[in-house]
Image (tube, rainbow, N blue to C red):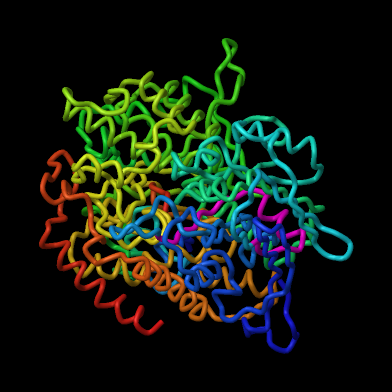
C-alpha cells in the first residue's frame, strides 16, 4: 500500500482526514485513487486530465516531483501533496 | 494559568490566569489571578483581549482610555513546537472607520519573548493610561511569584530596534525583550509602528533578527503610552516532553504542513518566498501598486533568481524545527557568508521590490532591513509607499512627498527613513487617510484603514471581512489560484465556513505556520495543559471570538459600505491576470448580502 499524507488545508475538505492508504503503481494513479475516493479534492489536485494543479507540489518520499506523475511506486512509499503557496493559509 | 480544581478539566471557568494591571500614569501595579469567564478567555490572545476592549469607550487610539493588552496564548511557552506567540491588542491608530473611530486590532509575534513572559508567571499585562516619562516594564520571575516594575528608559530613545535590544541584553541576563523603534516613538506621525521581539539568534549575533508584531500600529500605541521596552526575565521552563507532544512536534517539523516553509534540501519548497514562482504562473504577483504587467519582471525576485547573489541561511525561532526564517547575507568573494542583510518573507520581499518597481534584490534587501531597523510594519508602509509612487506617476505635474516614482530606489529609501523618523506623516498615517485627503481612493490598497498584504484584491473578495489584516485573519487570499472557483456559493462558504477559523492561533499561542488541525490542537491542550475540550468546542470558541471582532467594528462605527474593495478592482479590471478578474460590482454586492446574512445573525446573538 502507498501512504498519502495531506496538509490540514486539504484534509479539512474531507472531514479532517490527513493520511490514508491507497493501492497504486504510479504517483499519478495514487492521486487519482485519492480523488476518486474523495471528489471534493479533485479541483485542488488536478487542473486537467492527469495534469497536476500548478499550485500544488507533490513529494515522493521527501523528493519533490515535477509536473509528470509517472514515477513508479513501491510498497511503503509515501506521497505528500501540499499547496505550493503559503502565507495566511 | 492554572486550574482551580482537578475535577473540572473540561471547564474553562475552572481556569484562571495571572494579570498585571499597570496604571502608567499613577505607576500603580496590581497583580491578580483572574478567573476565566469563557473558552475565549482561557485560550487567550485576542480571544481574551477583545472582550476587554469591548467594554471600553475609546474615540481615539491616543487617549489614556485606550488600554494596550500584552498577553500570551494558553499554549505559549509549552513544549508544543511553535507555541511562542505574544499578542498586542488595542484600539488601533491605523484602523479607522469612516466616522473617525479607531478599530480594535491585535498583532502577534513569535520567538522567545512570549515564552519568557509566560515563565515569569504573568499571562497578561494590561497597560492603562500613559506614562509622563519614557519607561520600560521589567517583568521578573521571583521565588514568591512574578514581580513587575517600571524603570526609566531615556537611554533607549532614538535607537533602532536591534540596538535597543543589544543594550538591554547587557543589562538583563536570561531575558527577552519587546521594543519599539523610532517609528513607535514618533507615534503622532507614524501610525504603523511595530513591536520588535528579540530572538535567540539575535542575542548571540547582534544582528537585526527581531520577530515582529507589526500590524495595526501596536508599537505606535506603546509609543503613545511612553513604554519603550518590556523585559521578560525568567529561567527557561522547558520540561520533559510527553510522548504525545513529541509525536506532534515531529509532525509539525517534518510533516506535510511545513514542507512549503522548509528548505529544499529538507524536503521543502524554500519558504513563503516560493510564492513568487507559484503566483507568477497566473500573473498574481503584485507589481507597481498591485497591478501586474505580465512582463516577466516578477521572476527577478524569485528565490532561484536571487539565491546566487547571496548566502541564504534558514534559521528559526526557539526550538522550532521548521526553520522558516530565510535570512539573507552578503556573499563574500570566496563565497562564504558575510554580513546579515534582511529576512526575506514573501510579503516584505514583494512589497519592497516588485510592487515598488524595484527589481534589484540588493536594493530590496536594503529597503527591508531599513524598515525593520526603524520598527515599522512592512505591509502598511510598503503598500502606502506603493500608492505614493502610483499617485506620482499619475500626476507628474503635482507630485507628493519627494516625487518618487516606481523603481526610484534612492527616493523610496528616503521615504522609508523619513517616515520612520516621523517626518512624513502623510505616509505614516496610512493609505486610507492619505488617499482620502488627495481625493483618489480608487487605487488605495486597503480596507477599513488596514493596508493589504502582497495578494491582489482582484483575487480575494474575502479581504473586507478580515478583522486584523488581510492575510492573517481571513484565509481566502490564496484560494483563487489554488481552486480557481469564481462562483458565489464557493466564496460565501470560503468566508463564512472556513476563512474565519484562521484566527484560532491568534488565541492559542501557536504559530499559524504549524497549521495544526483542530484535533491536534485539542490533543496539545489535553497533554500540555490538562484541558480537555472537543474540536467542535474549540471551533465554536474561535468563531465567537471572530464574530466579536465584527461586533467591535460595528461598535466603532463601521458601516456595511466600508466592507468593500478598492474601486479599481471593479472599474478597471486587469486583463493581464492569468485567472479572473471576476469580482464585478454585481458579484461583490451579492456576496456581501449573503455573507452578512450569516454574520449578522451571529453578531445579534453574541
At horizontal 39% and vertical 37% (from top left) the residue drawn is B425
In this picture, residue B476 sits left or right of residue B181: left
Residue nearest the viewer, comparing B561 with B157: B157
Q: Nearer the viewer, residue A76 or B508?
A: B508
Q: Residue at x 32, y 23 (%)?
A: B402
User: Is B339 situated left or right of A67 in this image?
Assistant: right
Question: Is B494 colored magenta in this rendering?
Answer: no
Rendering quarter of residue B203: top right
Q: Tell me if B205 is positioned left or right of B496 in this view.
A: right
Percent x, y for residue B267? Answer: 52, 43
Quarter of the picture holding the N terminus of chain B? bottom right
Rendered position, B101 above or below B181: below
Task: Name the quarter where the C terminus of chain B is drawn.
Answer: bottom left
Counting the numbered discs, the total is 0
Decide if residue A89 is in sight here: no
* Observer-nearest of B606 and B262: B606
Q: Residue furthest right?
A: B143
Residue A74 against residue B578 in the figure, above or below: below
- Nearest the viewer among B537 and B412 is B412
The question of residue B111 being in magenta is answered with: yes
Residue B65 shows in this picture: yes
Please give the name of the residue rendered at 56% of the width and 24% of the height, measured from the top-left corner. B329
B483 to B181, vertically: above or below: below
> Is B574 placed left or right of A25 in the picture?
left
Q: Which residues are magenta?
A: B103-125
User: Percent from the top left, x then y, of residue B403?
Assistant: 28, 23
* Residue at position x 65%, y 56% in the image: B25
Quarter-wise, where is residue B69 in the image? bottom right
The single residue placed furthest to the top in the displayed view is: B333
Q: Is residue B101 above or below residue B220?
A: below
Amino acid at each position: 500500500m502507498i501512504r498519502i499524507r495531506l496538509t490540514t488545508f486539504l484534509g479539512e475538505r474531507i472531514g479532517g482526514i490527513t493520511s490514508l492508504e491507497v493501492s497504486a503503481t504510479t504517483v499519478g494513479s495514487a492521486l487519482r485513487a485519492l480523488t476518486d475516493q474523495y471528489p471534493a479534492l479533485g479541483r485542488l489536485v488536478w487542473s486537467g486530465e492527469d495534469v497536476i494543479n500548478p499550485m500544488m507540489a507533490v513529494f515522493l518520499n521527501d523528493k519533490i516531483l515535477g509536473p509528470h506523475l509517472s514515477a513508479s511506486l513501491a510498497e511503503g512509499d509515501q506521497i505528500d501533496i501540499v499547496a505550493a503557496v503559503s502565507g495566511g493559509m | 494559568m492554572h486550574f482551580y480544581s482537578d475535577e473540572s478539566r473540561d471547564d474553562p471557568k475552572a481556569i484562571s490566569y495571572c494579570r498585571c494591571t499597570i496604571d502608567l500614569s499613577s505607576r500603580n501595579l496590581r497583580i491578580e489571578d483572574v478567573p476565566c469567564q469563557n473558552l475565549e478567555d482561557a485560550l487567550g490572545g485576542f480571544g481574551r483581549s477583545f472582550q476587554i476592549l469591548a467594554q471600553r469607550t475609546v474615540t481615539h487610539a491616543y487617549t489614556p482610555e485606550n488600554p494596550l493588552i500584552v498577553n500570551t496564548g494558553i499554549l505559549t511557552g509549552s513544549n508544543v513546537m511553535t507555541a511562542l506567540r505574544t499578542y498586542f491588542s488595542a484600539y488601533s491608530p491605523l484602523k479607522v472607520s469612516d466616522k473617525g473611530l479607531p478599530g480594535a486590532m491585535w498583532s502577534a509575534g513569535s520567538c522567545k519573548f512570549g515564552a519568557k513572559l509566560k515563565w515569569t508567571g504573568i499571562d497578561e499585562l494590561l497597560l492603562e493610561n500613559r506614562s509622563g516619562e519614557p519607561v520600560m516594564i521589567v517583568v521578573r520571575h521571583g521565588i514568591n511569584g512574578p514581580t513587575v516594575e517600571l524603570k526609566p528608559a531615556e537611554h533607549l530613545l532614538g535607537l533602532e530596534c536591534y540596538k535597543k535590544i543589544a543594550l538591554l541584553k547587557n543589562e538583563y541576563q536570561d531575558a527577552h525583550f519587546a521594543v519599539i523603534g523610532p517609528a513607535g516613538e514618533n507615534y503622532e506621525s507614524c501610525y504603523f509602528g511595530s513591536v520588535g521581539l528579540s530572538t535567540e539568534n539575535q542575542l548571540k549575533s547582534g544582528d537585526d533578527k527581531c520577530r515582529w508584531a507589526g500590524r495595526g500600529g501596536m508599537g505606535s500605541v506603546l509609543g503613545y503610552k511612553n513604554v519603550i521596552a518590556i523585559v521578560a526575565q525568567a529561567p527557561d521552563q522547558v520540561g520533559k516532553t510527553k510522548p504525545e507532544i513529541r509525536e506532534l512536534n515531529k509532525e509539525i517539523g517534518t510533516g506535510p504542513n511545513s514542507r512549503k516553509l522548509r528548505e529544499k534540501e529538507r524536503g521543502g519548497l524554500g519558504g513563503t518566498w516560493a510564492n513568487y514562482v507559484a503566483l507568477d504562473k497566473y500573473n498574481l504577483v503584485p507589481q507597481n501598486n498591485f497591478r501586474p504587467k505580465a512582463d516577466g519582471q516578477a521572476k527577478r525576485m524569485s528565490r532561484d533568481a536571487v539565491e546566487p547573489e547571496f548566502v541564504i541561511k534558514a534559521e528559526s525561532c526557539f526550538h522550532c524545527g521548521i526553520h522558516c526564517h530565510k535570512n539573507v547575507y552578503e556573499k563574500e568573494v570566496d563565497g562564504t557568508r558575510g554580513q546579515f542583510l534582511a529576512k526575506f518573507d514573501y510579503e516584505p520581499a514583494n512589497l519592497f521590490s516588485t510592487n515598488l518597481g524595484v527589481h534589484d534584490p540588493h536594493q530590496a534587501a536594503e529597503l527591508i532591513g531599513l524598515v525593520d531597523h526603524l520598527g515599522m510594519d512592512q505591509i502598511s508602509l510598503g503598500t502606502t509607499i506603493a500608492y505614493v509612487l502610483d499617485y506620482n506617476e499619475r500626476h507628474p505635474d503635482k507630485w507628493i512627498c519627494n516625487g518618487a516614482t516606481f523603481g526610484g530606489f534612492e527616493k523610496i529609501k528616503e521615504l522609508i527613513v523619513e517616515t520612520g523618523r516621523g517626518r512624513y506623516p502623510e505616509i505614516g498615517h496610512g493609505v486610507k487617510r492619505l488617499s482620502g485627503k488627495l481625493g483618489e481612493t480608487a487605487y488605495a490598497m486597503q480596507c477599513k484603514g488596514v493596508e493589504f498584504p502582497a495578494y491582489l484584491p482582484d483575487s480575494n473578495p474575502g479581504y473586507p471581512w478580515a478583522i486584523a489584516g488581510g492575510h492573517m485573519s481571513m484565509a481566502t487570499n490564496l484560494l483563487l489560484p489554488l481552486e480557481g472557483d469564481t462562483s458565489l456559493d464557493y466564496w460565501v462558504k470560503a468566508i463564512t465556513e472556513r476563512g474565519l477559523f484562521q484566527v484560532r492561533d491568534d488565541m492559542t499561542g501557536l504559530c499559524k505556520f504549524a497549521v495544526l488541525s483542530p484535533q491536534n490542537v485539542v490533543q496539545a491542550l489535553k497533554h500540555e495543559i490538562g484541558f480537555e475540550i472537543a474540536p467542535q468546542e474549540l471551533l465554536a470558541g474561535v468563531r465567537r471570538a471572530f464574530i466579536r471582532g465584527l461586533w467591535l467594528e460595528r461598535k466603532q462605527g463601521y458601516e456595511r459600505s466600508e466592507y468593500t474593495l478598492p474601486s479599481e478592482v471593479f472599474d478597471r479590471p486587469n486583463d493581464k491576470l492569468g485567472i479572473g478578474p471576476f469580482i464585478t460590482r454585481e458579484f461583490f454586492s451579492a456576496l456581501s448580502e449573503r455573507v452578512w446574512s450569516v454574520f449578522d445573525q451571529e453578531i445579534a446573538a453574541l
